[in-house]
Amino acid sequence: MKPIESPAVAAVFNHYPVEYQKSLLAIRQLIFDTADTLSPEMIVAESLKWNQPSYSTKFGSPIRIDRFGDNKIALLFHCQTSLVGTFRAMFADLFEFSKNRAIVLDPKQKLPVKELALCIEMALTYHKK
């Protein structure tokens, strides 16, 4: 597990209830692992945007992760990109979506890692088209 360097980001993760924290940390690690698979030199900047952990690269569109509603979690994407529309076309039968902004997941279910990694890859390289 990649250590969290920012005390502010660590505080947000520590504030989540355990059942959400586990899934959100797994998604966080998947973001870093996916970036490393794309290029070992790819730098993923971790910060807070709107008090949500946010991950961005030089050629990508930011990904934020957070709780969603009362009992879900989400990967949130910039609403003016085509990312969520593309994900919906690819994975309509697998993911729940929130408008053109988010992939919504149940933290009690096993994460669909392979499919999420593909979505993360597309976001991390969005502007490299």
Image (tube, rainbow, N blue to C red):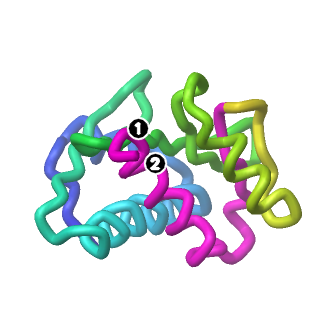
Whether residues under marks 1 and 2 lie with C-beta atoms below 8 angstroms apart, the answer is: yes
Decide if residue 36 is on the left or right side of residue 95. Answer: left
At numbered mark 1, what does the secondary structure look like: helix, strand or loop? loop
CA gap between label 1 and label 2 equals 5 Å
Amino acid, disc 1? Ser
Q: Position of residue 72 (x, y in %)?
A: 72, 49
> 59 or 129, which lies in front?
129
Residue 66: x percent and y percent? 54, 42
15 relative to 5 in the view: left or right: right
Residue 92 position by quadrant = bottom right
Query: Of all residues shown, which one is farthest toward the front?
Result: 129
Quadrant of the image containing the N terminus:
bottom left
Q: Residue at x 74, y 72 (%)?
A: 109
Residue drawn at x 40%, y 37% as measured from the top left:
62
Query: In which image quadrant can residue 69 be found?
Result: top right
Locate residue 109 relative to residue 41 in the image: left or right. Answer: right
Q: Which residue is mark 2?
A: 123
Circle 2 SS class: helix
Can I make out residue 89 in this image?
yes
Who is closer to the viewer here, 23 or 59? 59
Judged left or right of residue 73, residue 109 is right
Residue at image x 26%, y 36%? 47
Q: Which residue is mark 1?
A: 61
In the rendered image of this protein, does residue 119 appear above or below residue 14?
below
Q: Give yes or no for residue 108 being in the magenta stretch.
A: yes
Q: Which residues are magenta?
A: 101-129
Q: Return the disc, 1 or 2, that comes first in the chain's sequence.
A: 1
Question: Can residue 53 be spotted in the picture?
Answer: no
Residue 61 is situated, as x and y percent measured from the top left of the image, at: 41, 38
Of residues 6 and 89, which is closer to you in this image? 89
